[in-house]
Image (tube, grey):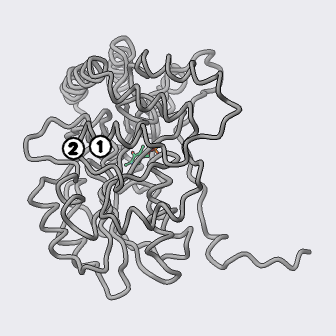
């Protein structure tokens, strides 16, 4: 027996589970479970990453100035207010470390991103779930959940795993309703995919408000999930506090170079967006035509709702897994009647629809 006593909240922490990439008895499974980009990384990003192999003995630039400047130029931001992290997940956790003390409350919506309770609990914070409306964050419910212990609100916009978003006026209303000692974290991991006119990632609010942090990632549209690169934008004060907490060399040189190249490969970015918008529409229509309900999505994935009984999400999941197609079943999040499907390459999208038809017709 050890005399060590971990901090009291550590043992209640759940370990985040990523999407599966293997299924029994299938040699080469098709993974459509983690919202990774169908087209993979930009060839320019791959080249930049490969070229970095010659300087692996050098410590990275601790201020990743090139990457920050490239982000700043692309979006019209101030470089000194950008913080980069080991995926945007690190930024979410840094925000909790900086602003949430043990016992403080952290609000997120019912079907929000699974990392939020993990990030909150990792610092002894108390996760508080607010109810959704039609699989979408409900601003009134979030505001009603605020107490004098609230220190942080996470809003995934668009949201994962539902694919829905809330409009600029709604985000502004949420911000106006929060006390100024509450940090509003706008997690815009899927912003690059969104075409809706009334959507904005959070740049305007993060630029003007003192208590808003917008987070972005290279793991989704840019296809660099393996490199673990994300960034945040906030007031100079918030950015400085996150910077104090991060590891000095959290962004490795090959990652910085690949990320920088990806941001400037506009042609590839446009191709990835166009591929997604075409196949998102196609999948939504085709799967809807099978009698399944698809939650309207602005992202690179859709949430499919199953009727239950013999046609349950669990049975569909088993059926697809046997055929080598991995989707995401999320019973742990109270979405046991749903499967989340990431938009894939044409042949994979067509194959999944054909299999879902077979499942529904059987
Ligand atoms: C995928 C995802 C992220 C995290 O991405 P990183 O790989 O850590 O950058 C953050 N938020 C949401 C909503 C996501 O779906």
Q: Nearer the viewer, residue 76 or 283?
A: 76
Q: Quadrant of the C terminus?
A: top left
Kindly identify which residue carries mark 2.
76
Q: Viewed as shown, does residue 138 lie left or right of 155? A: left
Q: Is mark 2 within 8 Å of ligand 1?
A: no
C-alpha span from label 2 to label 1: 5 Å
- Find residue 290 and report its image quarter: top left
Q: Viewed as shown, does residue 146 lie left or right of 310? A: left
Q: Is mark 1 within 8 Å of ligand 1?
A: no
Q: Secondary structure at mark 1?
A: helix
- Residue 64 percent location from the top left of the image: 48, 43
- With respect to residue 50, does 130 lie above or below? below
- With respect to residue 91, does 355 lie above or below? above
Q: Nearer the viewer, residue 108 or 304?
A: 108
- Residue 214 percent location from the top left of the image: 31, 55
Could you tell me if the residues under marks 2 and 1 are in contact, i.e. CB atoms within 8 Å? Answer: yes
Badge 1 crowding class, 10 Å Cα cut-off, few under 14, some 14 to 19, many 20 or more, is some
């Amino acid at each position: 027996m050890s005399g060590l006593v971990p901090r009291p909240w550590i043992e209640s922490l759940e370990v985040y589970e990523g999407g599966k990439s293997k299924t029994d008895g299938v040699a080469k499974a098709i993974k459509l479970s983690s919202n990774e980009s169908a087209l993979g990384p930009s060839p320019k990003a791959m080249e930049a990453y490969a070229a970095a192999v010659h300087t692996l003995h050098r410590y990275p630039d601790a201020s990743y100035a090139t990457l920050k400047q490239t982000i700043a130029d692309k979006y019209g931001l101030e470089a000194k207010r950008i913080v980069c992290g080991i995926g945007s997940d690190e930024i979410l956790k840094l925000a909790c470390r900086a602003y949430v003390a043990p016992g403080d409350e952290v609000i997120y919506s019912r079907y929000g991103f699974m990392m939020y309770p993990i990030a909150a609990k990792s610092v002894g914070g108390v996760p508080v779930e607010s109810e959704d409306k039609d699989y979408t964050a409900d601003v009134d419910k979030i505001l009603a959940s605020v107490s004098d212990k609230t220190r942080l609100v996470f809003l995934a916009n668009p949201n994962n795993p539902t694919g829905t978003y809330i409009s600029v006026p709604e985000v502004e209303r949420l911000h106006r309703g929060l006390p100024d000692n509450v940090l509003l974290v706008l997690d815009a991991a899927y912003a690059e995919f969104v075409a809706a006119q009334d959507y904005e990632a959070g740049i305007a609010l993060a630029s003007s408000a003192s208590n808003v942090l917008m987070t972005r990632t290279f793991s989704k549209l840019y296809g660099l999930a393996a490199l673990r690169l994300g960034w945040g934008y906030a007031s100079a004060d918030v950015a400085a506090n996150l910077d104090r907490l991060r590891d000095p060399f959290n962004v490795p040189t090959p990652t910085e170079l690949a990320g920088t190249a990806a941001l400037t490969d506009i042609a590839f970015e446009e191709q990835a967006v166009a591929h997604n918008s075409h196949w998102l529409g196609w999948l939504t229509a085709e799967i809807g035509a099978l009698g399944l309900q698809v939650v309207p999505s602005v992202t690179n994935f859709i949430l499919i709702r199953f009727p239950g009984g013999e046609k349950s999400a669990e049975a569909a999941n088993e059926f697809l897994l046997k055929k080598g197609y991995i989707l995401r079943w999320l019973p742990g999040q109270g979405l046991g009647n749903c499967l989340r499907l990431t938009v894939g390459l044409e042949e994979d999208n067509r194959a999944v629809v054909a299999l879902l038809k077979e499942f529904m017709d059987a």
